[in-house]
Amino acid sequence: MKLSKTSLLSFVLITAIISGCGAYSFTGASIKDDVNSISIAKFFNDVGGGPPNIEQTFTNDLQDYFQRNTNLELVPTGGDLQFEGAIIRYGIRPQAIASSGSRDRADQSGLMRLTIAVQTSFTNIKQEEDSFKKTFSFYADYDPQATPITQIEDDLIEEIFKQIIQDIFLASVAQW
C-alpha cells in the first residue's frame, strides 16, 4: 500500500494534534497534570432502605470507576480530589396502573420505579472553584407482575449506580 504525500501529511498532522492535547482522554476526563491522587470516603446510607451493603457497593463501584478511567492513585484520605457523601433516597413507587379486569379485584401497579439519589461532596484541592456539593439521582422501571423486586433488585441497583457514577465522573473531572 502506497501513501500519497497528502495522505502522509494529513496523518502526521492529525497525530500531532491528538498527541499535543495533553489533558484530553477518551473517557472525557480533563485532569490537570498536578493532580495525582484521589480519595473516596465511604458513602453512608442515610435512608436505611435497600440491601444492607448498598453503601459499600456504591463506594466500591465509584472507586473502581475512577481507577479504570483515570491514572490517579487511590489514597485513603487527603487526595488531590476528594469525594464523600451519602445515599439520601431509595424509593419504590408505582408508575402505571394495570387494570385487573375484574370488578371484584383491585387494580394493580403495572410498572414500578426504583429511584436512588446520592448526595456527593467533591473537593478539588488544586482548583477549589471546581469543588461542589450536588445530588445525583437516577431510576429504573420494572414490571412487578413479571419479576418481583427481590429477584431483580441487585440488577436495578447496578444499572442506577452506573448512571449516577458516570454523572459524578462527568461533573467532577470532565466538568460537563
Image: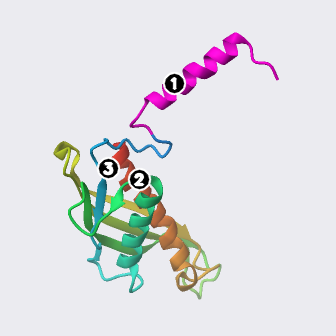
Residue to which mark 3 is pinned: 172
Residue segment shown in magenta = 1-24
Residue at 59 percent across and 74 percent down: it is: 143
Residue found at the very far top of the displayed protein:
5
Image: 160 above or below 16: below
Q: CA distance from mark 1 to mark 3?
A: 28 Å
Looking at the picture, how far across and down is residue 106, in whole percent? 54, 84
Amino acid at dot 1: Ala
First in sequence, mark 1 or 3: give its number.
Answer: 1
Looking at the picture, how far across and down is residue 152, in whole percent? 56, 79
Local secondary structure at mark 2: loop
Amino acid at dot 2: Asn
Local secondary structure at mark 3: helix
Q: Are marks 1 and 2 in contact (CB under 8 Å)?
A: no
Residue at 43 percent across and 73 percent down: it is: 93
Amino acid at dot 3: Ser
First in sequence, mark 3 or 2: give its number.
Answer: 2
Can residue 112 be spotted in the picture?
no
Where the C terminus falls, by quadrant?
top left
- Viewer-closest of 133 and 92: 133
How crowded pointer 1 is (Cα within 10 Å; few <14, some 14-19, many 20+) is rated as few
- Viewer-closest of 164 and 106: 164
Q: CA distance from mark 3 to mark 2?
A: 15 Å
Image: 91 above or below 162: below
Q: CA distance from mark 1 to mark 2?
A: 22 Å
Residue to which mark 2 is pinned: 71
Local secondary structure at mark 1: helix
The quarter holding residue 116 reads bottom left
Looking at the picture, how far across and down is residue 88, in whole percent? 28, 71
Residue to which mark 1 is pinned: 16
